[in-house]
Image: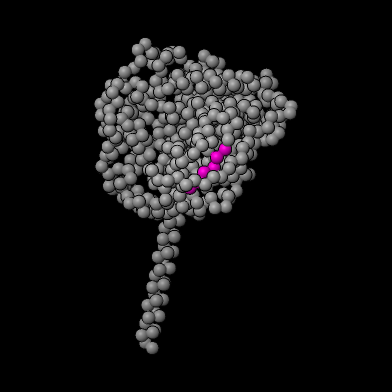
Amino acid sequence: MGGSKRRSSWWGDALLMLVSIVVSVAVAEAVVRVLNGQPLLAFPLPDAHDEGVLKPGQVDAIARAPGVDRAWFFTDPAPLPNRQPPPDGWQSLFMDLREKLSRNSSFQPNDVFKAWNTAFAGSDPCQHPFLKQAPGQLYLYDPADGKASPPYRFYPNVTLPDRLVTNQMGWRGAPIEVPRGPRTIRIVFTGSSTVVDGHFAPWSYPEYVGHWLNKWAEAKKLDVRFEVLNSARESNASTDIANIVHSEVLPLRPDLVVYYEGGNQFRLDSIVEDVPKGAAVRPPGTGASLTPDWLRAASRWSALLGRVQAAIGFAASDLDGKEWPKPDYKVVWPTGLDEQDPDLNYPNLPVDLNKIQRDLDRIRADLGAIGSDFALSSFAWMVKDGLVLDPIRHRYILEQLNISNYPYRYRDLERLAKFQNRLFAKYARVNNVAFIDVAGQLPLDPDLFLDAVHASHAGTRMRGWITFNQLVPLIERHLADKSWPRPMPDPQPPLPTFTPRHIILSCKAA
């Protein structure tokens, strides 16, 4: 009898201790989330570096257009009316693929839910070097023009498992107004991943632009509404963007199309003699080796374990955040090419700028044929000679600059990024195209970036604010001469929507 009481007491004490531990851990988790500025009930957590941090004075350093209220910067767009649960089975499939697909695999879980262009995929996707990696299934669509570019469209009218919300065109964002109203000004942004922004982010920077334009219109009591759309998708090169404008954007008869891209064709081998072979050598104590895989995975769900991961990484790192060691190489600048005032017709421009200009010409011609305007943006790179980064918090910037862009030095990446933007500015000036200087206005602050080109949430808001303020004078001129909103054809052309079809794959391992 006494033994039974002792066992009961032991179990009671053990249960009380377990409950105390659970409560203590839960309280500690809540405290860390509050200190980090993270949501209390988010599972998984947004990455800490995804949020970014604005510094005092950064907002005020951005030139505001007349009539723009600084307080608008701190307001958010309305929740998307078309956000809904992912289709049945998609979320569990996505989570399963996150576990099964190799971190180094080029085919990633969200690629399963894209609608792939059949001209790109070919008659047998199992013979395609990329699509053959698909885990047993794909969605396909037939391009109206028969071209293999763009390679894919986002699945339309869904919320994807990675939280991206698409409209009837498969574009990120709210449903497109059909029919377009007579007092609606339609602006379409086009580009790549730096325009579509992170799928996990609540809004892309074009959505902020649309939100603030409508606040501006309301404050000025204008009888117009702004519809700002986002046709971008990751991995697009300039030719993909030109094809998207031709096949998807033109039927919408936009008043303005804004182009932002400058990373996917940014390769320095055209000006480097005998590019050194080999791969980047990670300095000791940095990157993925800092902590075990299970702790990095658990940190996506627990802010407390995230602090443990950061502490281990900080203690293990003997790096001061400087540029990694790289071999010597020789830069050969094209003979006769003025770096400060580039010749647009120079036959061998660096970083694929001849091809990019040809695609910009195609976009201008297409838009000119329907009376739409075009705007070109400078492109922001988080790089400068002598840049020093936090090796833990800014790990992805370090890796993109030192691994993805190996063996090129920061000074040469900075040099070419500035040259590209000078050429964009001149192209806009010579061709009477509006120029939006994002790179010239955005602070060179690593907390505004996820990696060397993609924005954190704070950086997304800043890019939107810069673009919004630089668009206001252009819009005012069009409103003054009554050229915007442009009249739509009657009847209005149908949206170039599409219906993906699902196929099962049985690709044999190579």
Give the prevailing secondary structure in the magenta stretch: strand
For residue 88, above or below residue 202: below
Q: Position of residue 466 (x, y in %)?
A: 52, 29
Of residues 279 and 376, the one nearer the viewer is: 279
| Image-quadrant location for residue 485 | top right
The stretch in magenta equals 136-141
In this rendering, position of residue 127 left or right of residue 74: left
User: Can residue 122 be seen at all in this image of the molecule?
Assistant: yes
Q: Residue at x 46, y 52 (%)?
A: 96
Q: Position of residue 231 (x, y in %)?
A: 56, 33
In the rendered image, the quadrant that contains the C terminus is top left
Whether residue 140 is in magenta: the answer is yes
Farthest residue toward the right?
Answer: 490
For residue 359, above or below residue 337: below
Of residues 261 and 154, the one nearer the viewer is: 154
User: Can residue 373 be seen at all in this image of the molecule?
Assistant: no
Total marks placed: 0
Whether residue 436 is in magenta: the answer is no
In the rendered image, the quadrant that contains the N terminus is bottom left
For residue 281, above or below residue 27: above
| Image-quadrant location for residue 262 | top left
Farthest residue toward the bottom?
Answer: 1
Farthest residue toward the top?
Answer: 336
In this rendering, position of residue 257 left or right of residue 390: right
Q: Position of residue 28 (x, y in %)?
A: 41, 58
Q: Residue at x 55, y 40 (%)?
A: 140
